[in-house]
Each structure stands twice: as C-alpha cells, then as structure tokens.
Amino acid sequence: MSGWNRRKSVWTSVIVGRKALQWSALVPLLLMIVGCAGIMSPSQKVAVKRAQMHMGTLVAITAVAPDLEAGHKAIQAGFNEIKRLERLLSTWIPESELSQVNTEAGHRPVAVSWETLDLVARSMEMARLTEGGFNIAVAPAVEAWSVTERQHIPSDEELQRLKVLVDGAAIQVDRALRTIFLPHKGMKIDVGGIGKGYAADRAAEEMKKAGAQGGVVALSGDIKAFGSLPDAAGFPVGIKHPRKEGVVIAVIDLQDEAISTAGDYERFFERDGVRYHHILDPQTLRPARACQSVTVIGKEGVLVDGLDTGIFVLGPERGMALVEQLAGVEAVIIDNQGKMTLSSGLRSRLRNP
C-alpha cells in the first residue's frame, strides 16, 4: 500500500530513527522475545509475541492469555484479519477493491465490501473534522513528489494541474448500493494515512474473540493496546524525539487505547538545506511546515491515525484546539521550532523514559 510504508522494524526497548526500512516514532517498551516464546507471570498469565510482514511493514502482535496455546491462537486471529484487510485496501495489489476504484475513476462506481466502504466513509469524516487537513485523495500529488524514490520537486504548474484530482469532497460513497465512485479520470485514493490504525482496531477485536485477555497490535507507528501486561497497569510506549536519533522524549502507558504519530522525519529528502517530506498540505500540495511531529492518543486506532496527519497539516494552535474539543483524545505536538505542547489531559500521564 503506497501510504503504508514499506520498511522493516523491530521490537526493542529503545527507539531508532525512522528512515527507509527502519522503525518509527513509537515503540512498545516491552522486553519480550520475538517468535514463539512467552513470558509467564506470577498471575499465571502468559504474554506471547510474534511478528510478520504485512501492509509493507513488520507487524508485531503481543497477546496476553491464560496459556501459550491460547496466546498463539489469538495472535493468529489478529494476523489473519490484517491480511484480509490488506487484500481489500492495498493499492499495491492490483486486484484490491481500492485499486479497482482507482482504475475506474471517471468511468463507473465500483461495488466494495462494507469494510472498504466504512474506511473510506470514516476517512471523509476525518477530512471534515480536520478542515481538509486529512485527505485520502491527495495520492496523485504524493506520487508527483515521489519523496522516497525520484525525489522530484514539482513546479507550481504541475501542482496546479493536479488540483482537480485531489478534491476529497468529490469522492462519492453510496451506502445503499455500497459503491465508491471517483468522478475524475486520474483521481486516486489511498488510505495509507488511516488504514493501519483501522487494521489495528480490527485485529484487536479478533484477538479478543479468540480469547486474548490483553494485547498490543503494532503496525509500524500505529499501535493499539487492550487490557494490560501480566502484573502491570497497561502497555508502556515511548515517543521519539523528531530530531535526535534514538532519543525518547516521553513514555505513556496505554490503557485500552491507540496511539499514532505523524512526523516530517518519516519519509523525506533534503535539497539546498530544505527538508521535503511526505505529509502534504492538501491546499498547497506542498509539504506542511508547521510541525515536526504530532502524536495522538485515543480509543480508536482509525481515529488517531487520521487525526495525527490532519493535525500536522492544521498546525499546533488549530490542531491542539481541535484535540481539546474531542472527548477521550490527547496529543503531543512538536512545532517547527521544536517546542512541545501537551493537551490538558495528558500532562499527568507522561513520564520520563
């Protein structure tokens, strides 16, 4: 999936920088063993962890269960759900439903599954919530920049020609017929900026159904946690400094929550001293400049995954004003000068690494 970064990652007790094929802004600080091992606690619960490649990144899943067999069963249920969603949503798979929607842009509506319809509809709601800061239709502009490959700086004329193709409000979702239609030939939608959070939510639900009493689903920098570690009060997650390699600025214990970070250090190139990154302002179709990173915590992965990008585009003041209006949502915003701002409900929860 073009928005879902194709890179490797590892579980570790520290955070490494997020460049090509490296880890992201967030990492669970869990000293567990990758593979088929587990850790037994005095409470007789076991924490089991496995990792596989999906959605262009290393997906790590931890399950807390009564025994190893139950833990592995829950983990497999999580992986199966992620694989199923990838086949529907990945624009890297020509046969996926979203690829078909893009292929038929300007021609006809495409019938899709309820999951694809739901995610696109949620994406459009997120666009309205962030005043257009989040926009799944910006894919043609992202391709024009090609930050990780051609590293092209488009001219004003090039970007102006793309304007009609990146109008997210033009996406037509018919709930009754369960179809999606892109009215202009050349339009493309990519849910990479919200799809990993959605997949983490769905995987966590399947794990619960399979018997997991707690767990973590980590798709790169999008993490969903439920329950807690054996004999612990949640799942600790570190937030990386956007400019200092390997430095953790704070730790938060997730308690039935999701966390996601958008940063200008994730995918970028520099030319003549200027950093060009992949988070584009849908209004200018150029990299958004007001923030270095935005981390959002909330109950739903799909919500925080879309919000972090939208707030990054809105900027610190408008972005934090939005966060303070949303129940159950908190954020850490680091502006373009490196100043960190915390939402009101987060100040008592962050701790030093």
Image (cartoon, rainbow, N blue to C red):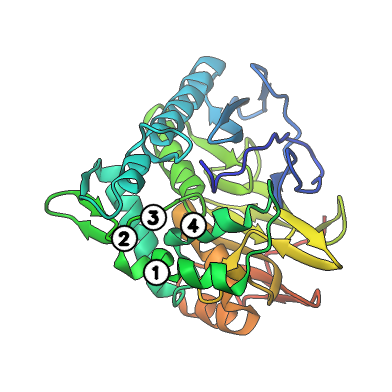
Disc 2 + disc 3, Cβ < 8 Å: yes
x 59%, y 33%: residue: 59
Q: Earlier in the sequence, mark 3 or mark 1?
A: 1
Q: Is residue 33 visible?
A: yes
- Dot 2: what SS? loop
Q: Quadrant of the C terminus?
A: bottom right
Instruction: Give the residue pinned by disc 2.
Output: 184
Disc 2 + disc 1, Cβ < 8 Å: yes
- Dot 3: what SS? loop
Q: Earlier in the sequence, mark 2 or mark 4?
A: 4
Q: Residues within 10 Å of mark 1 (few under 14, many from 20)?
A: some
Instruction: Give the residue pinned by disc 1.
Output: 164
Q: Earlier in the sequence, mark 4 or mark 3?
A: 4
- The relative height of residue 1 versus residue 44 in the rendered view (above or below) is below
Q: Is residue 312 visible?
A: no
Instruction: Give the residue pinned by disc 4.
Output: 140
Q: Amino acid at mark 2?
A: His
